[in-house]
Amino acid sequence: MKNTVKYILHKLLGFKNYLFVFSLFKIYTLKSDKNEKDFFQFLSLIPENTVVLDIGANIGIMTVHLARAVKGVTVYSFEPMPNNITAFKRIVNYFKLSNVSLFETALGNTEGEAEMVMPVISSVRMQGLSHVVHSSITEHNEGEHFKVPLKVLDKMDELMNAEKRISAIKIDVENFEFFVLDGARNLILKNKPIVYAELWENENRQKCFDLFQKLNYKIFIVIENEMLKFDSAKHKTQNFIFLPA
């Protein structure tokens, strides 16, 4: 049913207009979405006058909340998909966000070029599932393919020489998180940011856990507005907050 509605809206509005309207809808309703309470807990932890990275910014939904919720914050957003970028820029202009900078690139632990796919399911383009085409990612690989730039966070001068501390990272890149974070080890060690990540229950999650443990981080989840140490035997979730020990 949901895909049918999306298909109709894509046809009625055109895909680019649909993305803009959908982003507006989600921005204005996000606080009432019970699935996003973890994000707002993360948001409450971000200190003022710092830099936040929104990795996998998509169509700007989280970027808007990050940019507006914390005094003096600068948001560096990363999004490589062309249609998402168009919607993102419209959203930033709509909300007049002068504290947001967009980097039109994918991220990983090597530099060069990446192939990405926007999955198409039942004739519906699923922009939220867009991801790097990689041997470790076996789901949602049929759809529209793009070649995009690929960069490493640790090699970006804008970040490594930032005037303000990078205090927080939100990352959601559809099972490519480990490779992005692996390319940001020095940045994480230098800045000790809070990290909010959506991680599916698979090898990518475990590799991220192992990486953060090596970096001396603790793993937390949010249950009823309370942060608890993650226990895999008891807790079932995809949303995690990593805090430096």
Image (spheres, grey):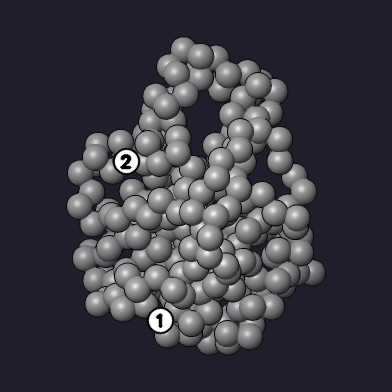
Q: Position of residue 113 (x, y in %)?
A: 55, 55
Q: Quadrant of residue 16?
A: top left
Which residue is pictured at 49% across the width and 54% down the height? 149
Please state which of residues 83 and 91 is positioned toward the viewer in this rendering.
83
Marking on residue 51:
none
Please determine whether, in this image, residue 132 is positioned above or below residue 8.
below
Q: Is residue 76 left or right of residue 150?
A: left
Q: Position of residue 148 (x, y in %)?
A: 51, 48
Which residue is pictured at 27% across the width and 63% down the height? 74
| Residue holding disc 1 | 191
Q: Position of residue 51 (x, y in %)?
A: 32, 69
Q: Residues within 10 Å of mark 1 (few under 14, many from 20)?
A: some
| Residue holding disc 2 | 89
Q: Is residue 31 left or right of residue 220?
A: left
- Residue type, numbered disc 2: Lys
Q: Is residue 239 visible?
A: no
Which quadrant, please, contains the N terminus?
top right
Labels 2 and 1: the sequence-earlier one = 2
Q: Secondary structure at mark 1?
A: helix
Which residue is pictured at 66% across the width and 56% down the height? 175
Please determine whether, in this image, residue 73 is positioned above or below residue 36.
below
Q: Is residue 132 visible?
A: yes
Which residue is pictured at 47% across the width and 24% down the height? 15
Q: Position of residue 26 (x, y in %)?
A: 43, 37
Marks 2 & 1, CB-CB < 8 Å contact: no
Q: Secondary structure at mark 2?
A: helix
- Residue type, numbered disc 1: Asn
Q: CA distance from mark 2 to mark 1?
A: 28 Å
